[in-house]
Image (cartoon, rainbow, N blue to C red):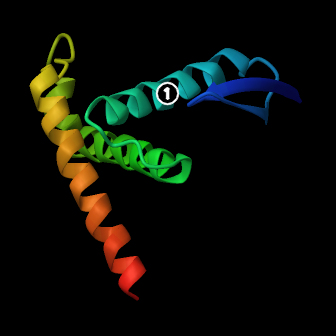
């Protein structure tokens, strides 16, 4: 088993993975880092746990969209990347929903 040290939001994490999967794990960490950078850009910085939760929600939202749109995308020659404005709007919607969920949890 291989071990890889990844950096997410300035913190180092050592994670185990199958031999040969080191680069894939590093790329996944870079995806998470990209989401965190996007969240920070719109003023969503409010603690490590919240940033990671919002990044996870963004990734889950993108996965959900990909699964729901898989059939139409198979017909396209090249996948179409969302516009920056669309991505920013989605991030704001997901962040707002996460804030609602967090508020509900705090009220419980």
Q: Quadrant of residue 63?
A: top left
The C terminus - image quarter: bottom left
List the residue tagged with mark 1.
33
Image x and y of residue 4, in percent: 78, 24
The one nearer the camera, 20 or 105, is 105
Image x and y of residue 11, in percent: 67, 32
Query: What residue lies at 33% left-to-right and 43% top-to-bottom?
Result: 44
Crowd tier of the residue under label 1, counting other residues whose Cα lies within 10 Å: few below 14, some 14–19, many 20 or above:
some
The N terminus - image quarter: top right
10 to the left or right of 42: right
Q: How many marks?
A: 1
The one nearer the camera, 57 or 12, is 12
Query: What residue lies at 56% left-to-right and 19% top-to-bottom?
Result: 27
Q: Is 84 above or below relative to 18?
A: above
Q: Is 71 above or below relative to 94?
A: above
Query: What residue lies at 16% left-to-right and 21% top-to-bottom?
Result: 84
5 to the left or right of 81: right
Question: Secondary structure under badge 1?
Answer: helix
Q: Is 66 above or below relative to 74?
A: below
Q: Quadrant of residue 3?
A: top right
8 to the left or right of 4: left
Image x and y of residue 82, in percent: 16, 24
């Amino acid at each position: 088993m291989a071990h890889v040290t990844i950096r997410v939001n300035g913190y180092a994490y050592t994670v185990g993975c199958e031999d040969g999967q080191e680069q894939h794990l590093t790329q996944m960490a870079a995806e998470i880092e990209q989401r965190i950078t996007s969240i920070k850009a719109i003023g969503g910085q409010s603690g490590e746990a919240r940033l990671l939760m919002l990044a996870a929600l963004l990734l889950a939202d993108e996965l959900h969209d990909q699964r729901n749109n898989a059939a139409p995308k198979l017909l396209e020659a090249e996948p179409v990347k969302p516009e920056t404005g669309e991505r920013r709007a989605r991030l704001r919607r997901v962040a707002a929903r996460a804030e609602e969920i967090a508020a509900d949890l705090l009220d419980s």
